[in-house]
Amino acid sequence: MASILIVEDEKSSAMLITQALTRAGHTVTAATDGADGIAKVKSLKPDLVIMDMSMPKMNGWQAIRSLKADAATSAIPIIALTGATTAGDRDEAYEAGCDAYENKPIDIPRLIARVKEFVKG
């Protein structure tokens, strides 16, 4: 069982991902924006972060850069999740430091498979 943090401002998306990952045996915590996500990553030290890229207050690109720049959190894998589907968006997410990239609308079986690439359980 892995500990996963979902950073997502859309409640319906966060609920969908949380339910699917919980059914898959993981412990899931949610954050609603990048700043909240950074605080929870630092306090909880999850095994994996699923990060929406377009959020208020602090977006996913900023949050990923901050987490990857901090030695205490840089090794935690991050899956970027976004409705922006251009190659440039994907490249920008990887440049920010994400370890994987998934598009919205969310394909739950694909997301679960991607999570398995990074965590056990």
Image (spheres, rainbow, N blue to C red):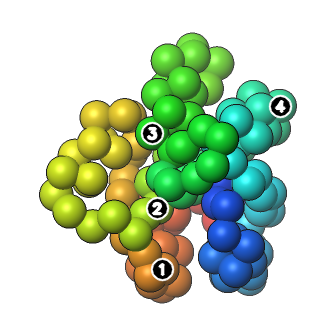
Q: Residues within 10 Å of mark 4 (few under 14, many from 20)?
A: few
The amino acid type of the residue labelled 1 equals Ile
Label 1 and label 4: CA atoms lie apart by: 27 Å
**Would you say the residues marked 3 and 4 are in contact, meaning their CB atoms lie under 8 Å apart?**
no
Q: Is residue 45 left or right of residue 51?
A: right
Q: Earlier in the sequence, mark 1 or mark 4?
A: 4
Q: Which mark is residue 106?
A: 1
The amino acid type of the residue labelled 3 equals Trp
Q: Earlier in the sequence, mark 2 or mark 1?
A: 2
Label 3 and label 1: CA atoms lie apart by: 19 Å
- Which sits in the foreground, 115 or 49? 49
Q: Is 10 rendered above or below residue 9? A: below
Q: Is residue 1 left or right of residue 82?
A: right
| Residue assigned mark 4 | 43
**Would you say the residues marked 2 and 1 are in contact, meaning their CB atoms lie under 8 Å apart?**
yes
Q: Is 88 rendered above or below residue 34? A: below
The amino acid type of the residue labelled 2 equals Leu
Image quarter hosting the C terminus: bottom right
Q: Which mark is residue 61?
A: 3
The amino acid type of the residue labelled 4 equals Ser
Q: Residues within 10 Å of mark 1 (few under 14, many from 20)?
A: some
**Would you say the residues marked 3 and 1 are in contact, meaning their CB atoms lie under 8 Å apart?**
no
Q: Which mark is residue 81?
A: 2
Nearer to us of marks 3 and 1 is: 3
